Amino acid sequence: MKNSSGRNLVKKYTVWKHIMLCGAAGFSLTVPLAYAQAIPAAAKMRPHVIVLTAFPPEWQAWTVQKSFQHQVLHVPGLITPLICDSKGVCVTETGEGEINAAVTVTSLVKDTALDVKKTIFIRSGIAGGVDEENSALGSVYINNWIISWAFGHHYLSDKKQLAWSPPGCTDYASPGHCENYTRNIMENLAYKINPELLNMAVNASAHVALDNSVEAKKLDKIFGISAAPKVMVGATITGNDFWIGKENQAIAEQIVHLYTHGKTTYTNTAMEDLGDVAALSRFGLADHYLSIRGISDVDVPPPGKTEEEIWKTGDLYASALAERNAVIVTEAVIARVLQDAA
C-alpha cells in the first residue's frame, strides 16, 4: 500500500507537473505575444538635424554651447558621442577624411536607437578656397555639388607638370556609359545636392552677418582679395591628401567642369563630404545632405612664394574665423529646418 500510494503520488505529481509545464508553455507562447502588442516598441530618437564636424576645433565650436548637453547618445562606430539639444539638433565628430566620414554616417544610419529617415545631415566645417578676388577668407560656401578628387589618374606629364586624366571615360557629358559614372551607378564621382534643400539653405542664410578679423584682412591683402566674407554657392572637391598650387587648382577646376557637365565651378576643397554623401546614398538618403564650408586658407601660395616654401613654413590660415562663420550659417539653416518641421 505504501509503495502503491507513493507511486500514485508520483503519477499525480508527474501529471500535474506536465499540466503546469504545458500551461507555462502555453502562457509563454500566447500571453507575451498579446502582452507585447500592448507595449510600444522602445522610442527611437528622430533628430531633425545631425551636424557633422571633422576634427576637435570644429567639434568644440558646437560643444561650447550648453544646449547640447540635453541628451548624449553613445553610438557604436562613432569616435565621439552624439550630443543633442532639446529641439532635436545633434552634433558629432567624424574624424578627418572620406573613410572616417563614411564609417560615422553609416553607423548613425544603422544604429537601432536612431531613426534618421527624415533627418537632415549637415557637414559644417572649414575648407581650402580658390585664388579668386571675391572669395575672401572667412567666406562660407553652401555647396551645390560634391566632387571626387581621388578617382582618375594624377600624374607628372612629359613636360614635368602636374596633370590629370579621368577614370575610363573621356566625355562625361554624353549619355550612356560615361554619364553613368557621375550618376554614381559605377563609381562615386559626383553628387548633386538636392536643389530644394540647397535653395532652402541659401534663402535661410541670405541675410546673415558674417564675422571678419584683422588677421583675415591681412591675409586677404597678401592674396590681393578685396571682398569681405560672404555666403556663396559652389562645388567642393573631396580628397584625403593636402595639396596646394595653381596646377592643382587648375586640375580641380577641370574635374568639376567635366563631372558636372559645366553646371558649376570649383570653389573649395575639404576631406570628408564625399564620404558623407556616398554613405547616405547607399541608404537612399543622399537628398538629405548639405555641405557648408567656411574658407580658412587659399590653396595657392601667396605672391612671391613657392609651393615648397609653403610646405616648409606652413600655410596661412584664418581657421578660427572660418569655423565661426560656418557655424553662423549652419545655425541659420538649422533654424529654417526647425521652422519648416514645426
Image (spheres, rainbow, N blue to C red):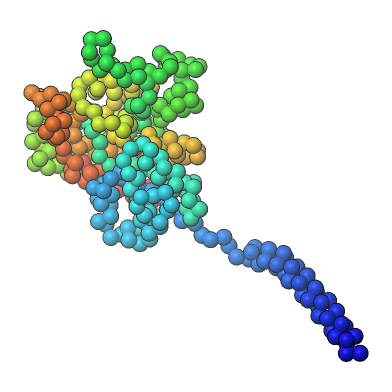
Quadrant of image for the N terminus: bottom right
Query: What residue is at 45 percent from the left and 23 percent from the top?
Result: 181
Q: How many marks?
A: 0
One can see residue 14 in this view: yes
Q: Is 71 left or right of 228, judged from the image as shown?
A: right
Q: Nearer the viewer, residue 144 or 284?
A: 284
Please give left or right for residue 224 compared with residue 115 in the image. left
Of the pair 207 and 16, the residue shown nearer to us: 16
- Residue 105 x %, y %: 42, 44
Find residue 74 and report its image quarter. bottom left
Q: Residue at x 50, y 17 (%)?
A: 176
Q: Residue at the location (20% across, 24% down)?
A: 245
Displayed quadrant of residue 12: bottom right
Instruction: Inspect this view and state whether residue 136 appears.
Output: no
Which residue is farthest top? 158
Residue drawn where x is 36% and y is 36% of the image: 98
